[in-house]
């Protein structure tokens, strides 16, 4: 395989990882900065399961943590899997808006007056799945940097024969 193509792929995966991670950072910040807004959103889309502002803070900080780990590329296997679960849960709650963005044919209640704007949830979900599937090709991250430093530290401490 051409190393330039591999480098391009690694940069593309890094850009995808950072942009998807920042989405979770923004989602988390919105819950921390305006927990009341988070309560209203969860009332509408999450069936009223998470009614308190305190839970919004918890979810907000959790999304901030997961998003930050994804952006940095640290603990990628777990962070990206957590991101996949968060985006999957979000997409699941608005399934009707994703299948029928203009509320033309599904006999369920309309999610929102502008429900076609929820479609990026599918992109975030698929992007997280791509990140998980191709994590070995995502070379520009802290996991790789730490692993490289450990290998160099071990090889420099092993005496030459």
Image (cartoon, grey):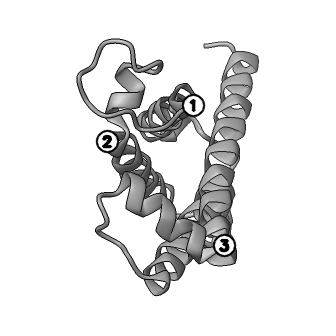
Residue 84 picture location, percent across and down: 41, 47
Residue 146 picture quarter: bottom right
Residue 132 picture location, percent across and down: 43, 41
Residue 158 seen: no
Front residue (pair 143, 20): 20
Residue at position x 41%, y 29% in the image: 97
Instruction: Give yes or no for contact between labels 2 and 3 (Cβ–Cβ under 8 Å).
Output: no
Indicate which disc, 2 or 3, sits on the residue closer to the N terminus: 2
- Residue ID for mark 1: 114
Residue at position x 48%, y 70% in the image: 39
Instruction: Give yes or no for contact between labels 3 and 1 (Cβ–Cβ under 8 Å).
Output: no
Q: As displayed, is residue 87 above or below residue 25?
A: above
Location of the C terminus (image quadrant): bottom right
Residue at position x 67%, y 32% in the image: 10
Residue 49 picture location, percent across and down: 29, 68
Front residue (pair 115, 160): 115
Location of the N terminus (image quadrant): top right
Instruction: Report the disc number at residue 153.
Output: 3
Q: Secondary structure at mark 2?
A: helix
Horizontal side of 93 relative to 69 (left or right) equals left
Front residue (pair 80, 43): 43
Which mark lies nearer to you, 1 or 2? 1
Residue 154 seen: yes
Query: Callout 3: 10 Å neighbours few (<14), some, many (20+)?
Result: few
Which mark lies nearer to you, 3 or 1? 1
- Residue ID for mark 2: 92
């Amino acid at each position: 395989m051409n190393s330039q193509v591999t480098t391009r792929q690694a940069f593309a995966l890094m850009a995808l990882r950072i942009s998807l991670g920042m989405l979770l950072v923004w989602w988390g910040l919105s819950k921390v900065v305006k927990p009341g807004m988070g309560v209203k959103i969860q009332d509408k889309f999450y069936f009223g399961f998470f009614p308190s502002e305190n839970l919004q803070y918890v979810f907000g900080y959790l999304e901030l943590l997961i998003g930050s780990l994804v952006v940095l590329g640290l603990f990628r296997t777990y962070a990206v899997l957590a991101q996949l679960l968060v985006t999957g849960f979000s997409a699941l709650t608005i399934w009707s808006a994703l299948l029928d963005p203009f509320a033309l044919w599904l006999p369920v209640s309309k999610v929102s007056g502008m429900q076609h704007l929820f479609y990026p949830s599918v992109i975030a979900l698929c992007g997280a799945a791509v990140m998980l599937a191709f994590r070995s090709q995502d070379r520009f991250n802290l996991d790789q940097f730490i692993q490289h430093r450990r290998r160099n530290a071990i090889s420099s401490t092993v005496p030459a024969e």
